[in-house]
Image (cartoon, rainbow, N blue to C red):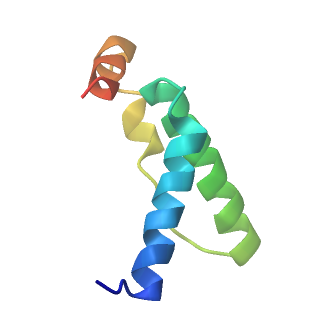
Amino acid sequence: MKVDKSLQEVWDWKDSVYQQTKQLSVREASEKIHKDVQQIKKKYGLKLKTLQPLLKCVPVAQLDRARDF
């Protein structure tokens, strides 16, 4: 079955993010992704809200358990 080029790009991107974050805890992965997003926002002048402040309300133990699923 032929896969659309744009869909393959999304799958490749998702795999790349996973490979870069699989050894990190959920909190560490979230912080890395948030930092990357901030750099992209700055580079392109985007005015987007992120969910990073919400993660500060979630206990670390709860986030680490979430990574196990």
Quarter of the image with the C terminus in it? top left
Query: Along the line of sight, which residue is nearer the eye, 67 or 16?
Result: 16
Residue 14 % position (x, y): 46, 58
Extreme residue toward the right, this view:
43
Instruction: Please state the total of marks drawn on the protein image.
Output: 0
Residue at 46% across, 54% down? 50
Q: Is residue 59 left or right of residue 50?
A: left
Q: Quadrant of residue 38?
A: bottom right
Up the image or down, 3 lies above or below 21; here it is below
Residue at 39% across, 87% down? 4
Q: Is residue 16 left or right of residue 40?
A: left
Up the image or down, 27 lies above or below 54; here it is above
Q: Quadrant of residue 37?
A: bottom right
Quarter of the image with the N terminus in it? bottom left
Q: Is residue 2 left or right of residue 40?
A: left
Residue 25 % position (x, y): 47, 23
Residue at 45% across, 71% down? 10
Extreme residue toward the front, this view:
1
Q: Is residue 15 left or right of residue 65?
A: right
Residue 62 % position (x, y): 28, 18
Up the image or down, 31 lies above or below 45; here it is above
Extreme residue toward the top, this view:
61
